[in-house]
Amino acid sequence: MREMVARCRELVETIYIQYDASHDLDHIDRVMKNAEKILLKEPAADKLVVQLAVLLHDIEDAKYEAMHEATTNEMLDQIGASADLSAKVLSAIESVSFNGGHAKEITSIEGAIVRDADRLDAIGAIGIARAFAFGGARGRKLYDLEEEARRTMSASEYRAKETASVTHFHEKLLLLKELMVTTEGMRLAEERHDFMVSFLKQLKNEIE
Ligand code: ADP
Ligand code: NI
């Protein structure tokens, strides 16, 4: 099992190296740490499924798909995962994406853990850093006082609009705390959420 996880990490390295700092290998490693914390409180979950899903969860991210041709399935084949294991990993990955509020429903505890672990890395101090890194990589404005945050939008509207980074806090990051599924995920989200709220308050004081 260890070997499969190590081999998978080696394979994904060459892919995440092409992504900007918001979704690089350090993101994957942080999500792994978050997932391991949650796993300690969810003993019924299959650790191997969670670990592989964490390593592979951003391979087919639509935001980066133009950068490489590898598929999650190929990676699972290359590490010798059985059909049953691959199906569980793919299913856990499926419900990770926020998709402008149109995430697929969680169907397993492993899926819940991976999604909560990924979302924890989208909030708090690290979430703030990543939002501005993503915005910077795409040439977005830091903030736009004229721009209204959308409350409802289709998945394609969510992707299509080049919003300022601060707008993204209102369209996604501040919503995540309420969307956590595991008890440990919810607990860990609290402090991170509050930190984003104080950050936005301070930012407002400085720029208005
Ligand atoms: P998912 O891929 O889970 O659907 P997102 O597309 O919202 O989620 O993006 C994942 C992360 O990328 C966000 O948490 C944020 O750090 C960054 N990001 C995505 N869209 C934006 C944006 N418009 N402005 C700033 N950061 C963004
Ligand atoms: Ni991710």
Image: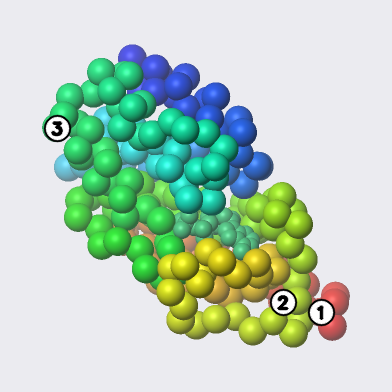
Please indicate whether residue 106 sits to the left or right of residue 22 in the image.
left
Q: Is residue 190 above or below residue 19?
A: below
The residue carrying pointer 1 sits among few (fewer than 14), some (14 to 19) or many (20 or more) residues within 10 Å by Cα, namely few
| Front: mark 2 or 3 | 3
Q: Position of residue 74 (x, y in %)?
A: 33, 27
Residue positioned 37% across, 53% down in the render: 96
Given the image, on which type of amino acid does mark 1 rest?
Asn
Determine the secondary structure under disc 1: helix
Q: Earlier in the sequence, mark 2 or mark 3?
A: 3
CA–CA distance in space, label 1 to label 3:
53 Å
Residue positioned 36% across, 34% down in the render: 72
Q: Is residue 143 above or below residue 8?
A: below
- The tag on residue 84 is 3
Residue at image mark 2? 201
Q: Position of residue 142 (x, y in %)?
A: 76, 65
Determine the secondary structure under disc 3: helix
* Quarter that holds the C terminus: bottom right
* Quarter that holds the N terminus: top left
Residue at image mark 1? 205
For the residue pair 96 and 2, the one nearer the viewer reads as 96
Given the image, on which type of amino acid does mark 2 rest?
Lys
CA–CA distance in space, label 2 to label 1:
6 Å
Which quadrant contains ligand 1?
A: bottom right
For the residue pair 39 and 19, the one nearer the viewer reads as 19
Given the image, on which type of amino acid does mark 3 rest?
Asp
Q: Position of residue 101 (x, y in %)?
A: 41, 70
The residue carrying pointer 2 sits among few (fewer than 14), some (14 to 19) or many (20 or more) residues within 10 Å by Cα, namely few
CA–CA distance in space, label 2 to label 3:
48 Å
Q: Is residue 185 visible?
A: yes
For the residue pair 168 and 75, the one nearer the viewer reads as 75
